[in-house]
Amino acid sequence: MAASEASVEATFFGTSSVHVSDGTSGVLVDGFFSRPSLRRVAFGRIAPDLGRITSALSRARVRRLDGLLVAHSHYDHAMDAPEVVKHLGGKLFGSDSTLHVGRGSGLDEQAMTRIADGDEHTVGSFTVRVLGGLHSPGNRFPGVIEEPLVAPTRASSYRDGGCFSFLVSHPTGSMLIHPSANFVPNKFDGLDVDCLYLGIGALGAQSPRFQDDYWRHVVEATRPGLVVPIHWDNFFVALDQKLRPLPALLDKFARTKEFLGRKSAESGIPVRFQDAFEVIRPFVR
């Protein structure tokens, strides 16, 4: 095992929040730590919980950032991001809608960068390629955020604003972080990554044909050495409790897990669920 490969570590925080660091540089995808209850999301107004944000970052020993990449602008991806950047530094990378979330929180324009499909950004020791995509089927809040969004506000105010995946490359390896369980045919052909963080939210509710096509166009296309499922957990439960799947009324996790197990056995590609705050070395085979 080369020391350089072991230098890159990835920490999972539930939903699609993943921190990747080589000990010097660090990038974070989404960074959603507040996790308001289902009752509050459904019937009330939501806002970043600064106590939960700082507690989670402290527990994970994340003290600074070079960049925070937002996959789309729903609250479970974008709501906390500006506050994380204020706390840790670095730049917020996102769509026009995500930047409006930043503006509503008072984040300085110089701390934000608009992204689009095909962009490539140097973020510390990492290179990030932005890949446009589609939200998983059943998008409840499509559309764009057209003006600065000030919290507290309704969850429905966080419109998706366009969806992205991120190819995060380092001199020692590469990973694709793909938060939404949908695909653009042939979009990822030939990427060949060491690790794939694979969004599986609502995948169990889709048809077998959709599931097979999803695996083919995302997993088979990128030929990862490891698949780590993300966006499977009940994000209405705080991170100080053990991660658990969404209730059966909201997703069919058992079906998804059976599907992943079968595809892993057929392909020989290992699938590994990562616990909250667990650190793995994604480039070490």
Image: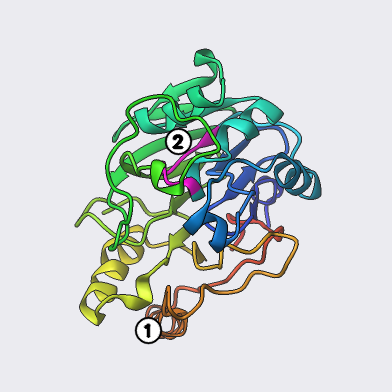
Q: Residue at x 47, y 39 (%)?
A: 70
Judged by its main secondary structure, the magenta piece is loop
Q: Is residue 212 above or below residue 16?
A: below
The residue lying toward the viewer, choosing from 157 and 64, is 157
Q: Residue at x 54, y 35 (%)?
A: 151
Residue 69 in magenta stretch: yes
Q: Is residue 142 above or below residue 231?
A: above
Q: Residues within 10 Å of mark 2 (few under 14, many from 20)?
A: many
Residue 147, percent across and down?
Answer: 37, 25
**Circle on res. 266:** 1
Q: Residue at x 49, y 22 (%)?
A: 103
Q: Nearer the viewer, mark 2 or mark 1?
A: 2
Q: Is residue 213 above or below residue 58?
A: below
Left of 137 or right of it: where is 255?
Answer: right
Tags 2 and 1 in contact by the CB under 8 Å rule?
no
Residue stretch rendered in magenta on the structure: 68-75
Left of 11 or right of it: where is 250?
Answer: left
The residue lying toward the viewer, choosing from 180 and 259, is 180
Q: Amino acid at mark 2?
A: Val
**Circle on res. 128:** 2
**Circle on res. 69:** none
- Give the SS element for disc 1: helix
Residue 207 in magenta stretch: no
Q: CA distance from mark 2 to mark 1?
A: 31 Å
Where, quadrant-wise, is the N terminus in this rendering? bottom right
Q: Amino acid at mark 1?
A: Glu
